[in-house]
Amino acid sequence: MIEKNQDLLSVVGRILLAIIFVFSGFGKVTGYAGTASYMASHGLPMVSILLPATIVVELGGALILILGWCVRPVALVLFLFLIAITLVFHTGGDPASNIQLLKNTAIMGGMLMVAAHGAGRFSIDGRQKR
């Protein structure tokens, strides 16, 4: 049954993975000044460059995942992005940081699965293969 529905499961999985990046990116746009201050408080240099780049990665990566276009390399970019974000912001050892670390670790696993297996048939990538 799972193999029969693999393409449907792939598109639902991509959408579910993308949702967190949509909300995170949108939150950074609507709370730009606060996010910039938060990033600076963690010692990040060039926040004026890193914050817009982060928004592009999050919102662009989410859109690409949802559409299923070039998902393998984008999933790897999001995987690497999450490593950096996790190391900078979520290694404090307190319970909240631990939860964020584990959440990001789970998302990284999902990104590796997308990178390994691709977008599936219900995607731009899938249409291009046919």
Image (cartoon, grey):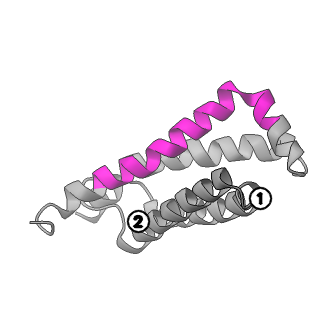
Judge left or right: residue 48 versus residue 66: right
Front in this rendered view, residue 82 or 68: 82
Name the quadrant of the C terminus.
Answer: bottom left
Q: Can residue 63 be spotted in the picture?
A: no
Which label sits on residue 114? Answer: 2
Q: Can residue 6 be spotted in the picture?
A: yes
Where does the magenta region start and end? 11-36
Which residue is disc 1 drawn over? Answer: 88
- Residue at the front extreme? 95
Judge left or right: residue 123 versus residue 90: left
Q: Is residue 88 above or below residue 66?
A: below
| Viewer-nearest of discs 2 and 1 | 1
The answer to whether the residues at label 2 and label 1 have Cβ atoms under 8 Å apart is: no
Secondary structure character of the magenta stretch overall:
helix
Tell me residue 70's x, y (percent).
Answer: 45, 60
Judged from the image, the secondary structure of the residue bearing numbered disc 2 is helix
Which amino acid type is marked by label 1? Val
Q: In the rendered structure, does residue 20 fall within the stretch colored magenta?
A: yes
Quadrant in the picture for residue 36:
top right
* Residue found 88% across the figure and 44% down from its top: 41
Quadrant in the picture for residue 118:
bottom left
Tell me residue 128's x, y (percent).
Answer: 31, 59
Judged from the image, the secondary structure of the residue bearing numbered disc 1 is helix
* Residue found 53% across the figure and 57% down from its top: 103
Front in this rendered view, residue 126 or 32: 32
Quadrant in the picture for residue 98:
bottom right
Name the quadrant of the N terminus.
Answer: bottom left
Judge left or right: residue 15 versus residue 126: right
